[in-house]
Image (cartoon, helix red, strand yellow):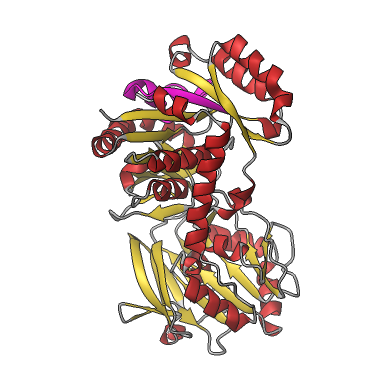
Amino acid sequence: MTRSLMIQGAGSNVGKSLLVAGLCRAARLRGLRVAPFKPQNMSNNAAVTADGGEIGRAQALQALACGVDPVTDMNPVLLKPETDIGAQVVVQGKRLTTCKARDYARLKPQLLEAVLQSFHRLKAQNDLVIVEGAGSPAEVNLRAGDIANMGFARAADVPVVLAGDIDRGGVIAQIIGTQAVLDPEDAAMIGGFLINKFRGDPSLFDDGYRLIETRTGWRGFGVLPYFADAHKLPAEDALDIAPSKGTGGVHIVCLRLSRIANFDDLDPLAQEPGVRLTMLGAGQPIPGDADLVIIPGSKSTRGDLAFLRAQGWDVDLQAHTRRGGHVLGICGGYQMLGRTVADPQGLEGAPGTDPGLGLLAIDTVMSADKTLTRVQATHAASGAPMQGYEIHIGRSDGPDRARPFAHVADQPEGAVSADGRVMGSYLHGMFAEDGFRRAFLSALGATASEQSYSETVDQTLDALAAHMAAHLDIDGLLALAR
């Protein structure tokens, strides 16, 4: 019979996604057919799946750790924030609705059936399903109708291990406090705990570890030291993108938009020694020494266009291009580069049309149909093959489309300005393709490395599994699964 195990956190961002990825790879190395599962995720960094839907980027990485293609059942409910109080609700890979947080609370109980359907389909195809919770079960104010943590665990009868983050401090209170606020029947689902992100000598925490065991009655599965190579794996949150370690002469600046989405384009660039990558925050001017400015994807193109202007980046971009600098707009960033962005149906906010940055002679009209597809492409300038994906609403057209950025199935894709310095494309994930990345960076004057990005990620997952096996009771964790 297929077994399952759930990793929940004593707080947000305790490292659940990485722990699940490592456990998935460890189980795979033991010869098990394993799949990841997250009932509900909140992220604008999505992946396009083999079955034509979208899921959270973390579940795509976990699928890679399992050696399988990501499918929509691995993350049946995905929330994609569009405003501070509302989000798009994606169910089993397809958009269901857009609603405010208070309205979603009433919708959640209706989504449990879809969540359980997806979970049981994965169980039918695998030996083991490793489940990731969301946020923390200690948020008992959200317990009614919960589908992300204990509500799911009890509905599917999945045992739970609670992870605490010692790097933030207060981990003893995190774990003991979680037990204190949980309903006794919820607490009974927890079979043990582990400590994550320890720095220094783990023996210094021996007394604290024993105190948690004594006060909770839960079994400890170990203390995991901080995994130094985590930055080599794709980040799910833009704030988690590791500072570039490159010292090369080419400076690439990415604008950190307020609704930045699908920014996995940046992970391969951050690891290039010939590139200095800067994630530019609100209020910071675009540096004068930038060689390339990337305007990334956005969950709200017109909203982030207003945000971009509020930072004065529109003025900075004009100065940047006058100095001979390059600009690359990806997806929503590509739409912003044009002359106008129209949303007549109000799909991303109030209906209307806004002027774009005017750096490309294109116009964009938003439409309800959403493009979700994996693509094979050829870079027009270099002839280098590319793999990527499209995940967007809207269509863009205009004179600069006569100079495409790439070709997909012999059709032009994207647009390039007459001087070749401003480029736009709907293709995400392009820089993961080693040959294209080298050609693109070489054109900017960077000495591109010979590293294989995909091999680096795969080797890092092996290293993560070995790191966890050295410090955690992996056999005990897998034995807890039922």
Image quarter in which the N terminus is found: top left
Which x, y percent locates residue 353?
Answer: 48, 66
Tell me the quadrant of the picture where the C terminus can be found: top left
Figure check: 115 above or below 391: above
Residue plotted at (65% across, 40% down): 226
> Which residue sits furthest bottom?
418
Locate residue 78 relative to residue 122 in the image: left or right.
Answer: right
Image quadrant assignment for residue 370:
bottom left
Give how far across and how far down residue 282 sits, in percent: 69, 57
Q: Position of residue 320 (x, y in %)?
A: 69, 78
Q: Is residue 388 left or right of residue 290?
A: left
Q: Which residues are magenta?
A: 137-163
The image position of residue 163, as x and y in percent, is: 55, 28
Quadrant position of residue 224 = top right
- Magenta span includes 152: yes
* Front-lying residue, 139 or 7: 7
In the image, 73 versus 87, the foreground residue is 73
On the picture, is 447 further left or further right than 146? right
Rendered image quadrant of residue 420? bottom right
For the question of whether residue 99 can be seen, the reply is no
